[in-house]
Amino acid sequence: MVSSTTIQTLLADRTLPAAMRAIAEKVAAGERISSAEGLLLFEEGELGFLGVLANTIRERRHGDHTYFNRNFHIEPTNVCLYTCTFCSYSRLIKQRSDGWEYSLDDILDIVKSYDGQPVTEVHIVGGVLPQYDVPFYESLFQAIKAHRPDLHIKALTPVEYHYIFKKAKISYEEGMARMLAAGLDSMPGGGAEIFHPEIRDQIAGGKCSGEQWLRIHEIWHELGGRSNATMLYGHIENFSHRMDHLEKLRELQDKTGGFQTFIPLKFRNQGNQLSHVPESTVIEDLRNYAISRIYLDNFDHIKAYWPMIGREIAQLSLAYGVNDIDGTIDDTTKIYSMAGSEEQTPALSTEELVKLIRAVGRQAIERDTLYGVIQDYSDAVFADDKQFQGYFSLPVV
Ligand code: V47
Ligand code: SF4
């Protein structure tokens, strides 16, 4: 455990404002906070206070366990017919001369290049183009399963699904059932951005709406599938838009229970149409993780995507509600390097990732996509193991 400051310590502080005290009492009792309280945390919650609450919940649920997954990403194309202003893939930004468009065989060759490697999941997501339609993805999923049946296919978002089902003139229900039959195992969390139309229309106009994103996940959950959810924050939205987004996710999760993980995605401002918008501070990133952990009481996991935020903030996030760090990722992950992430070579070996987790006093657990434990690295010894540097305390408010 990394926290020496407990909620009881916070409650003993007579200067704690009454509204914050009420929230802390709810968290101590394992009760749900309201959306108004969530908004108050966004507006007024101090980092140290939020950290104690979020870390309490994190340790109550997971102790020191910090999950990672050995996966690889395939991006079929880096051009897209949509023009999301935050995205470096948009045709407005990326000219086709420096773009790629993989064929089914190209994608299969990438899958085959991982033969013999202990990866458990392929994460497929990229731009939206007309040639990538329902029959294309059906054939792709079938071909991957024929080649490597045990590889979990986590693929596409409601942005692609909405587009391809509409083009094929089939319902979401029929479309998702066909994807399931073809071999789709789960859905990643992308394409959620900010659900509220006031913001979505400005940054992601033309692609599926917030309601459509939620509906496609709901249908997938009803088919027995699991999925993730994201929120792209730190651009032109305000706290009430973030709260609205979290509220809609919590409501759907109450209904279906199909979400596994929530992944806050920090907006990165290079190489896109929002380059003039300053990026959020580290303090805001940690506050956002913590509030997500506190508010989303029906989500099992909160994930930090380290290629986007960097290794140090990922380590810090483990004290602010996060219990999952995405993957031993290879160099095919290009979205964030194009958008300005400092992780220009976003690859870590399993050993590096385990050491990164251990260095902040947590326990590294390799998982599969559905959080089945593959290996607990608590006792693993590496050749150049440094003295354990862990254990630090959260700031006392
Ligand atoms: O939907 C695009 C985001 C998402 C930028 O489910 C940007 O396990 C920041 O969803 N700055 C795709 N973010 C990635 C994604 C994801 C990643 C890792 C794991 C999982 C999972 C899902 O990336 C897009 C969009 O919201 N994005 N451009 C940018 N400039
Ligand atoms: Fe296309 Fe997705 Fe980028 Fe929007 S965020 S331009 S839909 S790749």
Image (spheres, rainbow, N blue to C red):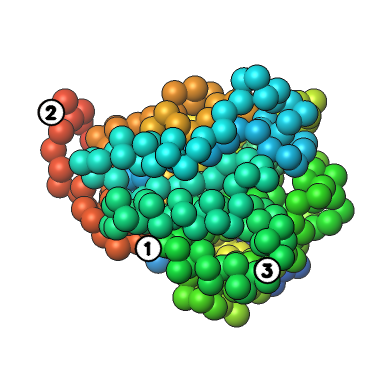
In-image side of 104 versus 287 (left or right) = left
User: Which mark lies nearer to you, 3 or 1?
Assistant: 3
> Circle 3 sits in a helix, a strand or a loop, which is it?
loop
Q: Quadrant of residue 245?
A: bottom right
108 or 87: nearer the eye? 108
81 or 199: nearer the eye? 81
Q: CA distance from mark 3 to mark 1?
A: 29 Å
Q: Disc 3 or 1, which lies upstream in sequence?
A: 3
Q: Which residue is disc 3 drawn over?
A: 170
Farthest top residue in view:
97
In-image side of 115 versus 383 (left or right) = right
> Circle 1 sits in a helix, a strand or a loop, which is it?
loop
Q: Which residue is disc 2 drawn over?
A: 383
Q: Disc 3 or 2, which lies upstream in sequence?
A: 3
User: For residue 370, which numbered disc appears in the image?
Assistant: 1
Identify the amino acid type marked 3. Ile
